[in-house]
Amino acid sequence: MEAICKPIKERLLERFNNARKIVGASWRQALAESDPFFNTLEGAGWMNQTTGAATKSTRISVDRIERVTLALEKVAGIQGSHI
């Protein structure tokens, strides 16, 4: 049997959506309060881009998705995150 792996972008977006569900509707505020970077205009842009990529196929750097996802998982209390 051949193992079929999802691309890293897709796996990160799944993790992002999971963490976002755990944190709840105020996830942006919680992320901005926990990480000073996300309390900036650039950080808010990264959050918006990641949200956009999670709902439709948009061009965004995997590194940006990773940064948002890992920070949100930390807020959500998700331990042992490996990329």
Image (cartoon, rainbow, N blue to C red):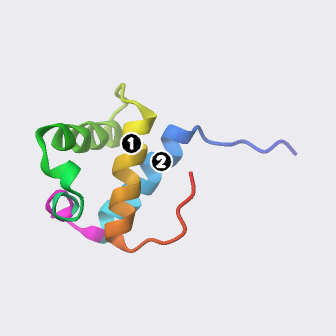
Q: Which mark is residue 82?
A: none
Label 2 Cα neighbours within 10 Å, binned few <14 / some 14-19 / many ≥20: many
Q: Residue at x 38, y 53 (%)?
A: 69
- Mark number for residue 12? 2
Magenta stretch holds residue 60: no
Q: Is residue 53 above or below residue 33?
A: above
Q: Residue at x 13, y 45 (%)?
A: 40
Horizontally, is 57 left or right of 6 in the view? left
Where is residue 13 shown, x and y percent of the image?
Answer: 43, 47
Residue stretch in magenta: 23-30
Give the CA separation, mark 1 to mark 2.
Answer: 7 Å
From the top left corner, tell me how far across and down residue 50 is, in percent: 31, 41
Looking at the picture, tell me which residue is in the foreground, 19 or 61: 61
Q: Quadrant of residue 34?
A: bottom left
Q: Residue at x 45, y 35 (%)?
A: 62
* Main SS category, magenta section: helix
State which quadrant residue 55 falls in.
top left
Amino acid carrying label 2: it is Leu
Judging by the rendered image, the residue that carries numbered circle 1 is 65
- Say which of 33 and 4 sits in front: 33
Q: Residue furthest right?
A: 1
